[in-house]
Image (spheres, rainbow, N blue to C red):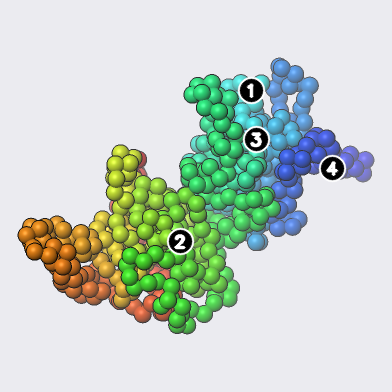
Amino acid sequence: MRERTDELLRLREKVRGGPSERATRAQHARGKLTVHERLEALFDKGTFVEIEGLRRHRAAGFGLELRRPHTDGVVTGWGRVHGRTVFAYAHDFRIFGGSLGESHAAKIHKIMDMAEAAGAPLVSLNDGAGARIQEGVTALAGYGGIFRRNVRASGVIPQISVMLGPCAGGATYSPALTDFVFMVRGVSQMFITGPDVVETVTGEKVTHEELGGADVHAALSGAAHFVHDDEESCLEDVRYLLSLLPSNNRELPPPSVPAPPVDVLDEDLLDLVPADPNQPYDMRAVVERLVDDGELMEVHERWAPNLLCALARIDGRTVGVLANQPRHLAGVLDADASQKGASFIQVCDAFNIPLLTLVDVPGFLPGTSQEHGGIIRHGAKLLYAYCAATVPRVQVILRKAYGGAYIVMDSRSVGADLSYAWPTNEIAVMGAEGAVNVIHRREVAASDDPETTRGILAQKYREELMHPYYAAERGLVDDVIDPRRTRAVVAEALRTLRTKQERLVPRKHGNPPM
């Protein structure tokens, strides 16, 4: 027994060390951590439990029968993150380039099934070269099994993809099906077809980074939610994100202890937001004043920056914040911002995270590029997501809220539980000048002094239909509040709505706009 036990320990040590020192040096030379170094950074110290570490592939042909390393290029198991159970699988690029074969896929299928059954988050550390070509169609079938499980677990457990190497072809669909995607600059890439194929088909010459690097997906495609400069900071942020999320859709996010005080008047808020509706400001600075310790985790920070989406805590509880950002495009809604907001709302709703919407929106972005690009259906996605959300929903209107964009930004009419407004709010079909151009077009044109006439009529329109108490008088705003008390008002609203329950009409599923 002692001899056999010693033999087992030697084998485990050999497996953990990887195929060779040379392969490990090559991994480090690429600026990448090894699979176990990544898992140690992700999990609480000493908590990771590996399963099927001794598994080998059964394939033959093309010399595979002569190369049967343990793990088959993927490490699977579970551990603790901030004391809570999290499941994970991590590709080992040192073995077959982390490519997926039949046994490799079977290990991933098993850990995904375990995560769903246990009701615990799943994190994938992706660093693989795609399907193992030598195994043919069985490798492709393995991907199909992963995709099916991604969809089955969607909205049931949090799924987080961390891109720490190449990801090409069909392999990219698994990250796209998960809730959050992290990428690292200079290390990770995602693309359906690589640079060589692109050049052959289209004639374009492009590098891996230009085609599918972290910055491309962070700012242009929207495929990456978070981007980091190195793996260590990336994995630390994955841990922080997990601390904000519940383990599954049947639980609430874990509260922080102790909750910071919320009943203090914040004089700085009076200076952060200009009363002039045309003057820009940084909405992020406002959000920082409202959330605990000024900490927020902004999602898709560089994609569609005219809409800010972030996870934070208020009164010690996780909240999803959506806010128009006047620093970018005056805070208008466009196609990308609508998609960004809709996706974020759906994730928050799935995992019992209440929504706080801060409104300062002049409307939807006009233009042929937006209309031809599908602003109608993309804007409908945001509207659909808000209407379908059953979590507590609180709206605060800071300044302007015009037209359809006011409705879409979680107005009372689409189901917000509570709507508050600052005394600088302007809720209307459109701005006063635009309204005068429509209503009084002939009168202005016939005037001896059109500009003066337009100004007088615009002021009259503001006084009659755009004063800060017009919506409150009609029950479309629950209260006009002192801006300095916004944090306290929102915290009390969310505390009151914490036990909210909403009955849904029985149906198989809705059909959201595509």
Residue at image coords 52%, 43%: 217
Q: Nearer the viewer, mark 4 or mark 3?
A: 3
Q: Amino acid at mark 1?
A: Ile
Residue at image coords 35%, 53%: 333
Q: Quadrant of the N terminus?
A: top right
Where is residue 107 shown, x and y percent of the image?
65, 37
Residue at image coords 47%, 82%: 264
Q: Earlier in the sequence, mark 4 or mark 1?
A: 4
Front one among 228 and 174: 228
Compared across the picture, whether 470 is left or right of 47 comes to left
Can you tell which quarter of the image residue 466 is in? bottom left
Q: Amino acid at mark 4?
A: Glu
Q: Earlier in the sequence, mark 3 or mark 2?
A: 3
Any mark on residue 13, and which? 4
Any mark on residue 133, and which? 1
Q: Nearer the viewer, mark 4 or mark 1?
A: 1
* Mark 3, other Cα within 10 Å: few <14 / some 14–19 / many ≥20: many
Total residue callouts? 4
| Residue that extends furthest to the front in the rendered view of this protein | 448
Disc 3 designates what residue? 128
